[in-house]
Image: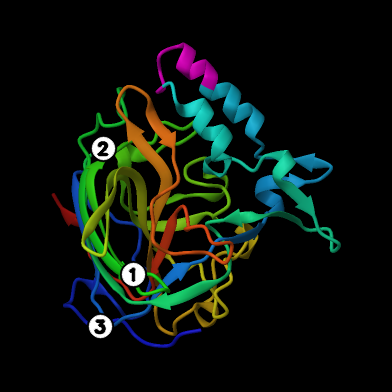
Amino acid sequence: MADGNAATHGKDIYDNGAQPQLSDVALPRERRVEQPRGKVVYWVMPGPRQLSPDVFGTPNAPKMTLAPKLKAAKQAVAAGQMPPAVPETLKKLPILVAAPLKARNRHSDGSWWIDAPTPFGDDGRIVQGSFTAHYKDRVAQDPPGTPPSTPDTASMTAEFSDPQGHNYRVVLKKVLKPPFPGYRTQGGVMIESYHHGLTGTGSPLMPKVKTHAAFWGMGDVYIDDKLADKNVVMHMMTTEVVRDRNYHLPLNNEMPLAPDQRLIKGQATHTHLIVLPLKVVHGKGPVFQPLKTAFKLPNGKTQPFMHIMFEQDNVGAVQPL
């Protein structure tokens, strides 16, 4: 649990605990978000995830399964509408679009879980960090063409440590439209919208969230000032708060959190950065490959993804572009 307040950075920054409202600024538009050093940052540990019944159904009536998404991906590849690597990538990282039936376990209280480690657990470790992001949203729908074919752009640099003291720098290089079945990312950058949960865009393990800004893209990861991994898939989103005061990630039906439930008193937004175990390979698309990190888990292996939470961000007003 943490307590604090975001620093004031001018009249166009929402730092008073109020949610930014859906914008009436027409496309094209832009938004800047930042968090300076010295504020609260969490490194999310791999952990199990309870499945929301309204998203994933029940053991007797399951929903959001992998089979139909995989079928759609194979059909799109056969039609030349999706990169060829996508079906195999979904088999290896199904939580991008679903929760496979074979990965679900029923607990004694009747709840349904993915017990295997996911990026959406309830255990976070406080680290140091900062970031700046500039989102430029030009289109309301994903234009046709390959994942890089979009007029939307963004820039982002994040610096942070891991719980064992290694230092990271993550740099976005290019916005992409994720080529996964059901995703609608509004050109790879969205400002004032919703995704995750039942929307079909983003992992359904995350509850549906009011999204003040988000991008999908690829970039590079540096560890202790050395290039460690390049052309990796990453997603950043600035949203309403989805962590309570015990760092629990709510189920879909538990959203939105009331102000007194949020992690930090007076803080209505936070920014998520997830760097996935996916690498963009020319001619193939997103290919499953564990992310190179320096953080060793209790099993002796390095964590194969990063999920960083900037809990005291400053969200700029939407501006015409």
Q: Is residue 110 above or below residue 244?
A: above
Which of the labelled discs sits on residue 166, or is there none? 1
Mark 2 is on which residue type? Val
Residue 138 in which image quadrant = top left
Residue pointed to by mark 2: 139
Towards the viewer: 35 or 48: 48
**Residue 145, image x, y percentages:** 30, 22
**Residue 128, image x, y percentages:** 33, 77
Of circles 2 and 3, which is in front?
3
Residue 67 in which image quadrant = top right
Residue neighbourhood size for the residue with mark 2, other residues' Cα within 10 Å, grouped as few (<14), some (14–19), many (≥20):
some
Q: CA distance from mark 3 to mark 1?
A: 26 Å
Mark 1 is on which residue type? His
Q: Is residue 285 above or below residue 165?
A: above
Quick one: label 3 or label 1, which is nearer the N terminus? 3
Q: CA distance from mark 1 to mark 2?
A: 38 Å
Residue pointed to by mark 3: 7
View extreme (top): residue: 79
Of circles 1 and 2, which is in front?
1
Secondary structure under tag 2 reads: loop
**Residue 160, image x, y percentages:** 30, 69
Residue neighbourhood size for the residue with mark 3, other residues' Cα within 10 Å, grouped as few (<14), some (14–19), many (≥20):
some
Q: Is residue 242 left or right of residue 145?
A: right
Quick one: label 2 or label 3, which is nearer the N terminus? 3
Start-end of magenta stretch: 74-83
Tell me what residue is drawn at x 59 percent, y 71 percent: 248
Tell me what residue is drawn at x 26 percent, y 32 percent: 148
Secondary structure under tag 3 reads: loop
Residue neighbourhood size for the residue with mark 1, other residues' Cα within 10 Å, grouped as few (<14), some (14–19), many (≥20):
some
Q: Is residue 30 left or right of residue 66?
A: left
Q: Is residue 41 above or below residue 61?
A: below
Mark 3 is on which residue type? Ala
